[in-house]
Amino acid sequence: METNINFCSFASTQGLSRRAFLKYCTTLVTLLGLPTSAATQLAAGLGGARKKPVVWLSFQECTGCTESFTRAFSPTFESLIFDFFSLDYHHTLQAAAGEAAEAAKTEAIEAGGYLLVVEGAVPLAEDGACSTIAGHSNLDTLRRSASKAEAIIAVGSCATFSGLPGAAPNPTDAVGIEQLMGLGLLEHRPLINLPGCPPLPEAISATLAHLIVYGQEPQLDALHRPRAIYGNTVHDRCPRLQFYYQGKFATTFDDEGAREGWCLYELGCKGPTTHNACPTQKWNQGTSTPIDSGHPCIGCSEPGFWDTSGLYVSLKPSAQTPLPGESDQVDKGRKLFDDNCVYCHEPNGQDLSTPLDEVPRAYRERGGRAHRMQVEDEQWRALVEYLESQR
Ligand code: FSX
Ligand code: SF4
Ligand code: F3S
């Protein structure tokens, strides 16, 4: 049930100054790609907002997403955001258990008007028997909970793209929320995907704050991810990018290159094909990232990251950001491919059996789950030219 809460008064009871609160709001609006002036609006919006009911479901996952969120950059403010919701059901965090917990969930669902956060994939094998809560399959619980939700926020790579539970050979037939909608097993609801294993905690809080203050989701891309958070690759903003362009690569974890902080591409870094805000937002109170600490990005926020290639196997050369000198047209085609096609196809399109000049027609005729982007003729020319350059 929605109840009034004065966020600012509540913040002051926690020893948080208005100045610190504004700073926190500035972090969130920056991450959301909103103008800095929106920080005041966000602060005022949260200050006057009503407490929003949230139902949080956990299915096949490791609880890392909840761990990530509860150990966020500004722990006091993140917990404040948590307290700011009426967290009507979260079986890891709630005090209630058993029938009392189920009763709280039923009451929240019947009241409607809540945000539904889902972490974890949903198993379909064996009629869903691989994961059940209170005797109900995850799919049944999800369907019931989604029926009156204002929006679904799929948190983590498991809920978005099936993640590790869905890795080959996927014995439980685990699927993500969007896949369920695509299969007709779950009614379509407004969906926001926040991939990452786990996702950045600020991605979760910023998205929830946006929903509360503006009553709508932030601008999303074709994979339902907030554009501002997932619009760039890790590579685009990597602190080691200069070494990439200089051709300076670490080849083992303890060689001179590793000690000098050179590029980790040859150690299997998936930064060039991974969309996430890690380099700018960083983890653990803005301290570091996998790459900052000397480990390649394993692409944890991309669909199928576990199966795409070996964690320490280099991307194929064609997946790299082009070196200076590549023609504009090929560069444009490569970007289009990297942003839209790499989720289902080999980085260089080598798995495309359709003759390249027939690809545009085949694409338009066949459609498909991932084939939703509108491609102009000029873009097709660039894409085909890029693919030809890889043959
Ligand atoms: Fe998956 Fe999240 Fe990775 Fe773990 O809930 S995204 S396995 S961090 O916990 O779902
Ligand atoms: Fe950074 Fe990885 Fe790109 Fe190298 S390949 S610049 S380490 S993201
Ligand atoms: Fe994941 Fe790569 Fe960031 S592994 S945490 S997306 S740097």
Image (cartoon, rainbow, N blue to C red):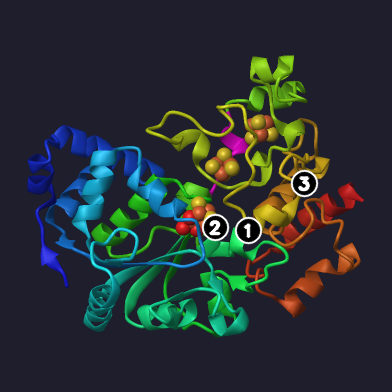
The image shows residue 58 at horizontal and vertical percentages of 42, 65
Secondary structure state at the residue bearing disc 3: helix
Mark 2 to mark 1 CA distance (whole Å): 7 Å
Q: Which residue is mark 1?
A: 303
Image point (69%, 48%), residue name: 335
What amino acid type is highlighted by mark number 1? Pro
The image shows residue 316 at horizontal and vertical percentages of 81, 43
Front residue of 64/145: it is 64
Mark 2 neighbour density, 10 Å: few (under 14) some (14–19) many (20 or more): many
Q: Magenta span has 233? A: yes
Residue 165 badge = none
Secondary structure state at the residue bearing disc 1: loop
Q: Is disc 2 in contact with disc 1, using a CB cutoff of under 8 Å?
A: yes
Answer with the quarter of the image where residue 281 lies.
top left
Q: Which residue is mark 2?
A: 157
Q: Quadrant of the N terminus?
A: bottom left
Mark 3 neighbour density, 10 Å: few (under 14) some (14–19) many (20 or more): some
Residue at disc 2, CB closer than 8 Å to ligand 1:
yes
- Label 2 or label 1, whichever comes before in sequence order: 2
Q: Nearer the viewer, mark 1 or mark 3?
A: 1
Residue 329 badge = 3
